[in-house]
Image (cartoon, rainbow, N blue to C red):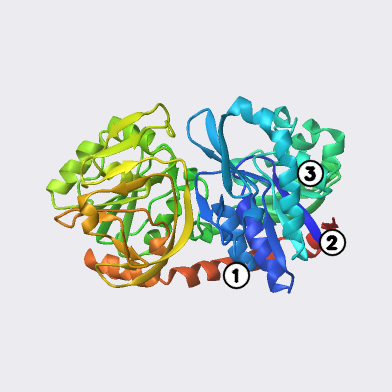
Amino acid sequence: MRALMIQGAGSNVGKSLLVAGLARAFVRRGLAVRPFKPQNMSNNAAVTADGGEIGRAQALQALACGIEPLTDMNPILLKPETETGAQVVVQGKRVATVAARDYAKMKPGLMAPTLESFQRLGDAADLVLVEGAGSPAEVNLRAGDIANMGFARAAGVPVVLIGDIDRGGVIAQLVGSQAVLDPEDAAMIGGFAVNKFRGDPRLFDDGYRLIEERTGWKGLGVVPWFAEAGQLPAEDALDLKGSDSSGKLHVACLVLSRIANFDDLDPLNMEPEVRLSMVRAGEALPGDVDLVIIPGTKSTRGDLAFLRAQGWDLDIASHLRRGGHVLGLCGGYQMLGKRIIDRDGLEGAPGVTEGLGLLDVETEMVPEKRLTRVAARHVASGEAFEGYEIHIGRSDGPDRARPFAKLDGQPEGAISPDGRVTGSYLHGLFSNDGFRAAYLTSLGVESTVTYGSNVEAVLDRLAEHLETHMDLDALLAMARRV
Protein backbone atom coordinates (compact mmCIF):
# COMPACT_ATOMS: atom_id res chain seq x y z
CA MET A 1 0.00 0.00 0.00
CA ARG A 2 0.88 3.64 -0.28
CA ALA A 3 0.26 5.95 2.66
CA LEU A 4 0.22 9.69 3.30
CA MET A 5 -0.36 11.52 6.59
CA ILE A 6 -2.27 14.77 6.95
CA GLN A 7 -1.16 16.71 10.02
CA GLY A 8 -2.22 20.16 11.19
CA ALA A 9 -0.23 23.19 12.26
CA GLY A 10 -2.86 23.52 14.98
CA SER A 11 -6.08 21.97 16.22
CA ASN A 12 -9.27 22.32 14.19
CA VAL A 13 -7.50 23.30 10.96
CA GLY A 14 -9.83 21.02 8.98
CA LYS A 15 -7.80 17.80 8.85
CA SER A 16 -10.80 15.48 9.23
CA LEU A 17 -12.74 17.21 6.47
CA LEU A 18 -9.74 17.24 4.13
CA VAL A 19 -9.12 13.52 4.66
CA ALA A 20 -12.79 12.80 3.91
CA GLY A 21 -12.69 14.90 0.76
CA LEU A 22 -9.38 13.47 -0.42
CA ALA A 23 -10.65 9.95 0.24
CA ARG A 24 -13.72 10.55 -1.92
CA ALA A 25 -11.58 12.19 -4.64
CA PHE A 26 -9.16 9.27 -4.84
CA VAL A 27 -12.00 6.74 -4.73
CA ARG A 28 -13.49 8.55 -7.72
CA ARG A 29 -10.14 7.99 -9.44
CA GLY A 30 -10.57 4.25 -8.95
CA LEU A 31 -8.37 3.64 -5.88
CA ALA A 32 -9.24 1.53 -2.85
CA VAL A 33 -8.76 4.07 -0.06
CA ARG A 34 -8.85 3.58 3.71
CA PRO A 35 -8.84 6.28 6.44
CA PHE A 36 -6.70 5.89 9.54
CA LYS A 37 -6.24 7.97 12.67
CA PRO A 38 -3.78 6.49 15.18
CA GLN A 39 -5.18 8.36 18.18
CA ASN A 40 -8.35 10.38 18.50
CA MET A 41 -9.95 12.23 21.40
CA SER A 42 -13.70 12.54 21.09
CA ASN A 43 -16.91 11.64 22.85
CA ASN A 44 -18.67 11.48 19.51
CA ALA A 45 -18.14 7.84 18.61
CA ALA A 46 -19.49 5.45 16.00
CA VAL A 47 -20.19 1.74 16.38
CA THR A 48 -18.32 -0.29 13.78
CA ALA A 49 -19.24 -3.30 11.70
CA ASP A 50 -16.87 -5.41 13.83
CA GLY A 51 -18.55 -4.46 17.10
CA GLY A 52 -16.26 -1.75 18.47
CA GLU A 53 -16.18 2.03 18.56
CA ILE A 54 -14.15 4.69 16.74
CA GLY A 55 -14.25 8.45 16.36
CA ARG A 56 -17.14 9.81 14.33
CA ALA A 57 -14.76 11.51 11.88
CA GLN A 58 -13.31 8.15 10.84
CA ALA A 59 -16.84 6.82 10.27
CA LEU A 60 -17.51 9.76 7.93
CA GLN A 61 -14.19 9.13 6.17
CA ALA A 62 -15.13 5.46 5.75
CA LEU A 63 -18.38 6.61 4.16
CA ALA A 64 -16.34 8.80 1.82
CA CYS A 65 -14.39 5.66 0.86
CA GLY A 66 -17.62 3.74 0.25
CA ILE A 67 -16.87 1.15 2.95
CA GLU A 68 -18.05 0.14 6.41
CA PRO A 69 -16.19 1.67 9.39
CA LEU A 70 -13.83 -0.71 11.20
CA THR A 71 -12.06 -0.46 14.55
CA ASP A 72 -8.66 -0.55 12.81
CA MET A 73 -9.41 2.89 11.34
CA ASN A 74 -8.97 4.46 14.80
CA PRO A 75 -7.14 2.03 17.09
CA ILE A 76 -6.75 4.42 20.04
CA LEU A 77 -9.78 6.49 21.09
CA LEU A 78 -9.76 8.69 24.18
CA LYS A 79 -13.16 9.65 25.60
CA PRO A 80 -12.91 12.42 28.22
CA GLU A 81 -14.92 11.76 31.38
CA THR A 82 -13.58 14.61 33.54
CA GLU A 83 -11.32 17.61 33.06
CA THR A 84 -8.27 15.47 33.85
CA GLY A 85 -9.20 11.90 32.93
CA ALA A 86 -10.45 9.86 29.99
CA GLN A 87 -11.60 6.40 29.03
CA VAL A 88 -9.04 4.62 26.83
CA VAL A 89 -10.45 2.51 23.99
CA VAL A 90 -7.97 0.24 22.19
CA GLN A 91 -8.97 -1.37 18.90
CA GLY A 92 -12.61 -0.71 19.66
CA LYS A 93 -12.77 -1.91 23.28
CA ARG A 94 -12.51 -0.02 26.56
CA VAL A 95 -9.36 -1.01 28.46
CA ALA A 96 -9.03 1.60 31.21
CA THR A 97 -9.97 4.99 32.58
CA VAL A 98 -6.84 7.00 33.39
CA ALA A 99 -5.71 10.45 34.40
CA ALA A 100 -3.85 12.49 31.78
CA ARG A 101 -0.47 12.04 33.49
CA ASP A 102 -0.99 8.26 33.65
CA TYR A 103 -1.88 8.12 29.97
CA ALA A 104 1.50 9.62 29.15
CA LYS A 105 3.07 6.56 30.77
CA MET A 106 0.68 4.26 28.91
CA LYS A 107 1.28 5.69 25.43
CA PRO A 108 4.53 3.91 24.49
CA GLY A 109 2.83 0.55 24.91
CA LEU A 110 0.09 1.56 22.48
CA MET A 111 2.36 1.94 19.45
CA ALA A 112 2.32 -1.83 18.79
CA PRO A 113 -1.49 -2.18 18.44
CA THR A 114 -1.54 1.07 16.46
CA LEU A 115 0.94 -0.24 13.90
CA GLU A 116 -0.84 -3.60 13.85
CA SER A 117 -4.13 -1.91 12.93
CA PHE A 118 -2.40 0.25 10.32
CA GLN A 119 -0.83 -2.74 8.57
CA ARG A 120 -4.01 -4.80 8.73
CA LEU A 121 -6.06 -1.95 7.30
CA GLY A 122 -3.58 -1.47 4.51
CA ASP A 123 -3.83 -5.09 3.37
CA ALA A 124 -7.00 -4.18 1.46
CA ALA A 125 -5.95 -0.70 0.31
CA ASP A 126 -4.17 1.02 -2.54
CA LEU A 127 -3.88 4.15 -0.41
CA VAL A 128 -4.19 4.81 3.33
CA LEU A 129 -4.84 8.43 4.31
CA VAL A 130 -3.64 8.99 7.86
CA GLU A 131 -4.95 11.84 9.98
CA GLY A 132 -2.87 13.34 12.75
CA ALA A 133 -4.22 14.78 16.01
CA GLY A 134 -3.70 18.30 17.29
CA SER A 135 -0.33 19.50 16.02
CA PRO A 136 3.21 18.12 15.81
CA ALA A 137 4.37 21.59 16.88
CA GLU A 138 3.29 20.66 20.43
CA VAL A 139 6.80 19.31 20.92
CA ASN A 140 6.26 19.07 24.68
CA LEU A 141 4.09 16.02 23.86
CA ARG A 142 6.61 14.42 21.50
CA ALA A 143 7.94 11.78 23.92
CA GLY A 144 6.03 8.56 23.34
CA ASP A 145 3.91 10.21 20.65
CA ILE A 146 1.69 7.91 18.61
CA ALA A 147 -0.58 10.57 17.07
CA ASN A 148 1.71 12.65 14.85
CA MET A 149 5.44 12.43 14.17
CA GLY A 150 5.93 9.46 16.45
CA PHE A 151 3.61 7.44 14.24
CA ALA A 152 4.92 8.94 10.98
CA ARG A 153 8.48 8.00 11.89
CA ALA A 154 7.57 4.51 13.15
CA ALA A 155 5.50 3.68 10.06
CA GLY A 156 7.65 5.56 7.53
CA VAL A 157 4.72 7.67 6.31
CA PRO A 158 5.39 11.07 4.66
CA VAL A 159 3.50 14.09 5.99
CA VAL A 160 1.57 17.01 4.51
CA LEU A 161 1.13 19.89 6.98
CA ILE A 162 -2.10 21.93 6.89
CA GLY A 163 -2.37 25.55 8.01
CA ASP A 164 -5.60 27.40 8.79
CA ILE A 165 -5.62 30.90 7.32
CA ASP A 166 -9.08 31.70 8.71
CA ARG A 167 -7.75 32.06 12.23
CA GLY A 168 -4.83 34.24 11.06
CA GLY A 169 -1.07 33.84 11.26
CA VAL A 170 -0.86 30.96 8.80
CA ILE A 171 2.71 31.82 7.78
CA ALA A 172 3.80 31.63 11.40
CA GLN A 173 1.83 28.41 11.84
CA LEU A 174 3.70 26.63 9.07
CA VAL A 175 7.16 28.22 9.21
CA GLY A 176 7.06 28.14 13.01
CA SER A 177 6.17 24.44 13.03
CA GLN A 178 9.31 23.65 11.05
CA ALA A 179 11.36 25.83 13.41
CA VAL A 180 10.34 23.94 16.59
CA LEU A 181 10.30 20.41 15.18
CA ASP A 182 13.19 18.02 15.62
CA PRO A 183 15.07 18.03 12.28
CA GLU A 184 14.35 14.35 11.69
CA ASP A 185 10.65 14.97 12.31
CA ALA A 186 10.65 18.02 10.04
CA ALA A 187 12.27 15.91 7.33
CA MET A 188 9.11 13.76 7.21
CA ILE A 189 7.14 16.74 5.87
CA GLY A 190 7.13 16.92 2.10
CA GLY A 191 4.48 19.54 1.49
CA PHE A 192 1.91 21.92 2.90
CA ALA A 193 -1.50 23.32 2.08
CA VAL A 194 -3.40 26.36 3.30
CA ASN A 195 -7.01 25.72 4.28
CA LYS A 196 -10.17 27.83 4.83
CA PHE A 197 -9.28 30.80 2.64
CA ARG A 198 -12.01 33.42 2.22
CA GLY A 199 -11.91 35.69 -0.83
CA ASP A 200 -9.52 35.61 -3.80
CA PRO A 201 -6.74 33.00 -3.18
CA ARG A 202 -4.41 34.92 -5.55
CA LEU A 203 -4.11 37.55 -2.83
CA PHE A 204 -2.04 35.05 -0.86
CA ASP A 205 0.47 34.33 -3.65
CA ASP A 206 3.32 36.19 -1.94
CA GLY A 207 2.68 34.48 1.40
CA TYR A 208 2.48 31.09 -0.30
CA ARG A 209 5.85 31.60 -2.00
CA LEU A 210 7.37 32.80 1.28
CA ILE A 211 6.32 29.57 3.02
CA GLU A 212 7.81 27.50 0.21
CA GLU A 213 11.09 29.45 0.36
CA ARG A 214 11.41 29.37 4.15
CA THR A 215 10.52 25.68 4.58
CA GLY A 216 11.61 24.04 1.34
CA TRP A 217 8.27 22.21 1.32
CA LYS A 218 6.18 21.90 -1.81
CA GLY A 219 2.99 23.96 -1.81
CA LEU A 220 0.01 21.73 -2.59
CA GLY A 221 -2.72 24.35 -2.77
CA VAL A 222 -4.78 27.08 -1.15
CA VAL A 223 -8.20 25.64 -0.34
CA PRO A 224 -11.08 28.14 -0.23
CA TRP A 225 -13.64 27.97 2.54
CA PHE A 226 -16.04 25.08 1.92
CA ALA A 227 -19.40 26.49 2.96
CA GLU A 228 -21.18 23.11 2.95
CA ALA A 229 -18.92 21.63 5.65
CA GLY A 230 -21.67 22.22 8.21
CA GLN A 231 -23.87 19.68 6.41
CA LEU A 232 -21.46 16.86 7.26
CA PRO A 233 -21.40 15.15 10.68
CA ALA A 234 -19.08 17.01 13.05
CA GLU A 235 -16.90 15.34 15.66
CA ASP A 236 -15.97 18.27 17.88
CA ALA A 237 -18.55 19.67 20.29
CA LEU A 238 -17.05 23.11 19.60
CA ASP A 239 -18.57 22.85 16.12
CA LEU A 240 -22.10 22.46 17.45
CA LYS A 241 -24.35 25.14 16.03
CA GLY A 242 -28.05 25.70 15.82
CA SER A 243 -29.88 26.15 12.55
CA ASP A 244 -30.59 29.36 10.68
CA SER A 245 -34.06 28.09 9.83
CA SER A 246 -37.19 29.98 10.80
CA GLY A 247 -39.14 26.72 10.87
CA LYS A 248 -42.24 26.52 12.99
CA LEU A 249 -41.05 23.57 15.14
CA HIS A 250 -38.60 24.85 17.73
CA VAL A 251 -36.27 22.15 19.08
CA ALA A 252 -33.74 22.89 21.83
CA CYS A 253 -30.81 20.63 22.71
CA LEU A 254 -28.99 20.98 26.03
CA VAL A 255 -25.23 21.22 25.46
CA LEU A 256 -24.02 19.08 28.35
CA SER A 257 -20.45 19.37 29.59
CA ARG A 258 -19.64 15.83 28.38
CA ILE A 259 -22.08 15.74 25.46
CA ALA A 260 -21.63 12.63 23.31
CA ASN A 261 -22.91 11.34 19.96
CA PHE A 262 -24.37 14.73 19.18
CA ASP A 263 -24.44 13.96 15.45
CA ASP A 264 -27.90 12.57 16.29
CA LEU A 265 -28.97 16.19 15.75
CA ASP A 266 -27.50 16.70 12.28
CA PRO A 267 -30.53 15.48 10.28
CA LEU A 268 -32.86 17.70 12.33
CA ASN A 269 -30.57 20.65 11.70
CA MET A 270 -31.09 20.22 7.94
CA GLU A 271 -34.87 20.28 8.10
CA PRO A 272 -36.32 23.63 6.91
CA GLU A 273 -39.33 23.27 9.20
CA VAL A 274 -37.15 22.74 12.29
CA ARG A 275 -35.48 25.57 14.19
CA LEU A 276 -32.73 23.99 16.29
CA SER A 277 -31.28 25.87 19.25
CA MET A 278 -28.19 24.73 21.15
CA VAL A 279 -28.65 25.78 24.78
CA ARG A 280 -25.27 26.29 26.43
CA ALA A 281 -24.08 26.79 29.99
CA GLY A 282 -25.48 29.97 31.48
CA GLU A 283 -28.39 30.16 29.04
CA ALA A 284 -32.03 29.53 29.89
CA LEU A 285 -34.24 27.22 27.89
CA PRO A 286 -36.23 29.39 25.42
CA GLY A 287 -39.86 29.75 26.39
CA ASP A 288 -41.23 28.97 22.92
CA VAL A 289 -39.59 25.54 22.59
CA ASP A 290 -41.75 22.63 21.38
CA LEU A 291 -39.27 19.79 21.98
CA VAL A 292 -36.34 19.58 24.39
CA ILE A 293 -33.64 17.00 23.64
CA ILE A 294 -31.36 15.79 26.41
CA PRO A 295 -28.56 14.16 24.40
CA GLY A 296 -26.04 11.47 25.15
CA THR A 297 -23.21 12.09 27.58
CA LYS A 298 -19.97 10.42 28.62
CA SER A 299 -20.82 11.02 32.29
CA THR A 300 -24.51 10.72 33.12
CA ARG A 301 -24.27 11.48 36.83
CA GLY A 302 -21.81 14.33 36.34
CA ASP A 303 -23.86 15.91 33.57
CA LEU A 304 -27.07 15.53 35.57
CA ALA A 305 -25.42 17.69 38.23
CA PHE A 306 -24.32 20.08 35.47
CA LEU A 307 -27.89 20.22 34.12
CA ARG A 308 -29.22 21.13 37.56
CA ALA A 309 -26.49 23.72 38.10
CA GLN A 310 -27.74 25.53 34.98
CA GLY A 311 -31.31 25.50 36.27
CA TRP A 312 -32.39 23.46 33.28
CA ASP A 313 -34.33 21.03 35.47
CA LEU A 314 -36.63 23.90 36.44
CA ASP A 315 -36.83 25.07 32.82
CA ILE A 316 -37.82 21.56 31.70
CA ALA A 317 -40.52 21.38 34.37
CA SER A 318 -41.96 24.71 33.14
CA HIS A 319 -41.70 23.52 29.54
CA LEU A 320 -43.76 20.41 30.35
CA ARG A 321 -46.37 22.46 32.20
CA ARG A 322 -46.79 24.45 28.97
CA GLY A 323 -47.51 21.22 27.10
CA GLY A 324 -44.07 20.68 25.59
CA HIS A 325 -42.27 17.43 24.76
CA VAL A 326 -38.97 15.99 26.03
CA LEU A 327 -36.76 13.37 24.36
CA GLY A 328 -33.85 11.84 26.26
CA LEU A 329 -31.28 9.85 24.26
CA CYS A 330 -28.93 7.38 25.96
CA GLY A 331 -27.51 9.28 28.96
CA GLY A 332 -30.37 11.74 28.58
CA TYR A 333 -32.79 8.81 28.92
CA GLN A 334 -31.05 7.73 32.12
CA MET A 335 -31.38 11.27 33.54
CA LEU A 336 -35.15 11.27 32.93
CA GLY A 337 -35.67 8.36 35.33
CA LYS A 338 -36.09 8.32 39.09
CA ARG A 339 -32.66 7.09 40.14
CA ILE A 340 -29.22 6.22 38.76
CA ILE A 341 -27.54 3.52 40.83
CA ASP A 342 -23.77 3.25 40.53
CA ARG A 343 -22.64 0.69 43.08
CA ASP A 344 -19.19 0.19 41.56
CA GLY A 345 -18.34 3.84 41.07
CA LEU A 346 -18.15 3.59 37.28
CA GLU A 347 -18.88 7.32 37.01
CA GLY A 348 -17.15 8.70 40.08
CA ALA A 349 -17.74 7.81 43.70
CA PRO A 350 -20.10 4.87 44.29
CA GLY A 351 -23.60 5.99 45.13
CA VAL A 352 -27.11 6.78 44.01
CA THR A 353 -28.13 9.93 42.15
CA GLU A 354 -31.72 11.12 42.04
CA GLY A 355 -32.91 11.56 38.47
CA LEU A 356 -35.33 14.12 37.08
CA GLY A 357 -38.23 11.81 37.86
CA LEU A 358 -39.99 12.40 34.54
CA LEU A 359 -40.02 8.70 33.65
CA ASP A 360 -40.85 5.87 36.05
CA VAL A 361 -37.64 3.92 35.42
CA GLU A 362 -34.40 3.33 37.30
CA THR A 363 -30.94 2.85 35.81
CA GLU A 364 -28.25 0.63 37.23
CA MET A 365 -24.72 1.22 35.96
CA VAL A 366 -22.92 -1.99 35.00
CA PRO A 367 -19.32 -2.43 33.79
CA GLU A 368 -20.21 -4.07 30.48
CA LYS A 369 -20.62 -1.56 27.69
CA ARG A 370 -23.29 -2.29 25.11
CA LEU A 371 -21.90 -1.67 21.62
CA THR A 372 -24.18 -2.83 18.85
CA ARG A 373 -25.96 -1.82 15.69
CA VAL A 374 -29.68 -2.43 15.75
CA ALA A 375 -32.70 -2.69 13.49
CA ALA A 376 -35.75 -1.31 15.27
CA ARG A 377 -39.39 -0.47 14.72
CA HIS A 378 -40.95 2.71 16.09
CA VAL A 379 -43.99 1.65 18.08
CA ALA A 380 -46.09 4.77 17.49
CA SER A 381 -45.71 4.93 13.71
CA GLY A 382 -44.67 1.41 12.79
CA GLU A 383 -41.66 2.82 10.87
CA ALA A 384 -38.61 0.59 10.68
CA PHE A 385 -35.24 2.25 11.24
CA GLU A 386 -31.60 1.47 11.97
CA GLY A 387 -29.48 2.83 14.79
CA TYR A 388 -26.87 1.85 17.34
CA GLU A 389 -26.35 1.53 21.08
CA ILE A 390 -23.21 2.66 22.90
CA HIS A 391 -23.66 2.86 26.66
CA ILE A 392 -23.19 1.38 30.08
CA GLY A 393 -26.24 1.02 32.32
CA ARG A 394 -29.52 -0.86 32.16
CA SER A 395 -32.88 0.88 32.67
CA ASP A 396 -36.14 -0.68 33.81
CA GLY A 397 -39.44 0.31 35.40
CA PRO A 398 -43.20 0.65 34.84
CA ASP A 399 -42.92 3.18 31.99
CA ARG A 400 -41.11 0.54 29.94
CA ALA A 401 -44.58 -0.92 29.42
CA ARG A 402 -44.96 1.93 26.92
CA PRO A 403 -41.83 1.36 24.79
CA PHE A 404 -40.45 3.80 22.27
CA ALA A 405 -39.39 1.03 19.88
CA LYS A 406 -39.19 -2.73 19.45
CA LEU A 407 -35.91 -4.60 18.89
CA ASP A 408 -36.48 -8.16 17.72
CA GLY A 409 -39.92 -7.91 19.26
CA GLN A 410 -38.55 -6.75 22.63
CA PRO A 411 -39.42 -3.34 24.13
CA GLU A 412 -36.84 -0.54 24.00
CA GLY A 413 -37.05 2.79 25.80
CA ALA A 414 -39.93 4.23 27.78
CA ILE A 415 -42.71 6.81 27.42
CA SER A 416 -44.56 8.69 30.16
CA PRO A 417 -48.31 8.09 30.65
CA ASP A 418 -49.18 11.41 28.96
CA GLY A 419 -46.92 10.59 26.00
CA ARG A 420 -44.88 13.79 26.24
CA VAL A 421 -41.66 12.42 27.79
CA THR A 422 -39.71 9.78 25.87
CA GLY A 423 -36.44 8.02 26.58
CA SER A 424 -34.41 5.73 24.33
CA TYR A 425 -30.92 4.24 24.18
CA LEU A 426 -30.92 4.37 20.37
CA HIS A 427 -28.56 6.69 18.52
CA GLY A 428 -28.70 7.52 14.83
CA LEU A 429 -32.48 7.26 14.64
CA PHE A 430 -32.98 10.65 12.93
CA SER A 431 -30.68 9.63 10.07
CA ASN A 432 -33.51 7.39 8.86
CA ASP A 433 -35.74 9.47 6.58
CA GLY A 434 -38.89 7.43 7.20
CA PHE A 435 -38.65 7.52 10.97
CA ARG A 436 -37.70 11.20 11.04
CA ALA A 437 -40.66 12.09 8.82
CA ALA A 438 -43.05 10.16 11.07
CA TYR A 439 -41.62 11.70 14.24
CA LEU A 440 -41.80 15.24 12.89
CA THR A 441 -45.33 14.65 11.62
CA SER A 442 -46.36 13.73 15.17
CA LEU A 443 -45.06 17.16 16.22
CA GLY A 444 -46.94 18.97 13.46
CA VAL A 445 -44.37 19.54 10.68
CA GLU A 446 -43.29 17.76 7.51
CA SER A 447 -39.84 16.44 6.62
CA THR A 448 -38.43 17.55 3.26
CA VAL A 449 -34.86 16.18 3.52
CA THR A 450 -33.27 12.95 2.31
CA TYR A 451 -30.37 12.92 4.72
CA GLY A 452 -28.12 10.11 3.49
CA SER A 453 -28.18 11.14 -0.16
CA ASN A 454 -27.53 14.75 0.87
CA VAL A 455 -24.38 13.74 2.79
CA GLU A 456 -23.18 11.72 -0.21
CA ALA A 457 -23.74 14.69 -2.52
CA VAL A 458 -21.81 17.03 -0.20
CA LEU A 459 -18.90 14.56 -0.10
CA ASP A 460 -18.86 14.54 -3.90
CA ARG A 461 -18.83 18.33 -4.01
CA LEU A 462 -16.05 18.40 -1.41
CA ALA A 463 -14.01 16.02 -3.58
CA GLU A 464 -14.54 18.30 -6.59
CA HIS A 465 -13.56 21.31 -4.47
CA LEU A 466 -10.25 19.67 -3.56
CA GLU A 467 -9.63 18.49 -7.14
CA THR A 468 -9.91 22.13 -8.18
CA HIS A 469 -7.80 23.73 -5.46
CA MET A 470 -5.20 21.12 -4.46
CA ASP A 471 -2.54 19.33 -6.48
CA LEU A 472 -3.88 15.82 -6.03
CA ASP A 473 -1.41 14.34 -8.52
CA ALA A 474 1.46 15.68 -6.41
CA LEU A 475 -0.20 14.39 -3.25
CA LEU A 476 -0.51 10.92 -4.71
CA ALA A 477 3.09 11.00 -5.94
CA MET A 478 4.20 11.98 -2.43
CA ALA A 479 2.47 8.95 -0.85
CA ARG A 480 5.10 6.36 0.03
CA ARG A 481 4.87 2.59 -0.21
CA VAL A 482 5.06 1.11 3.28
Query: Along the polypeptide, which appears first: circle 3 or circle 1?
Result: 3
Q: Position of residue 127 (x, y in %)?
A: 76, 62
The three-letter amino acid code for the residue at tag 2 is: Ala
Q: Quadrant of residue 23?
A: bottom right
Circle nearer the N terminus (2, 3): 3
The answer to whether mark 3 and mark 1 are in CB contact below 8 A is no
Label drawn at residue 211: 3
Looking at the rendered structure, the secondary structure element under dot 2 is: helix
The residue that disc 1 covers is: 460
**92 horizontally vs 202: left or right:** left
| Above or below 350: residue 454 | below
Q: Residue at x 57, y 59 (%)?
A: 60
**Image point (24%, 38%), residue name:** 313
Q: Nearer the viewer, residue 175 or 16?
A: 16
The span from disc 2 to disc 1 (Cα, nearest Å) is 22 Å
Image-quadrant location for residue 150? top right
Q: Which residue is the site of mark 2? A: 477
Mark 3 against mark 1, which lies toward the viewer?
1
Determine whether the residue tagged by mark 3 lies in a helix, strand or loop: helix
Left or right side of 479 for 293: left
Q: Amino acid at mark 3?
A: Ile
Amino acid at pointer 1: Asp
Alpha-carbon span between mark 2 and mark 3: 21 Å
398 left or right of 305 in image: left
Identify which residue is drawn at 42% across, 49% down.
241
Q: Position of residue 16 (x, y in %)?
A: 62, 52
Quadrant position of residue 480: bottom right
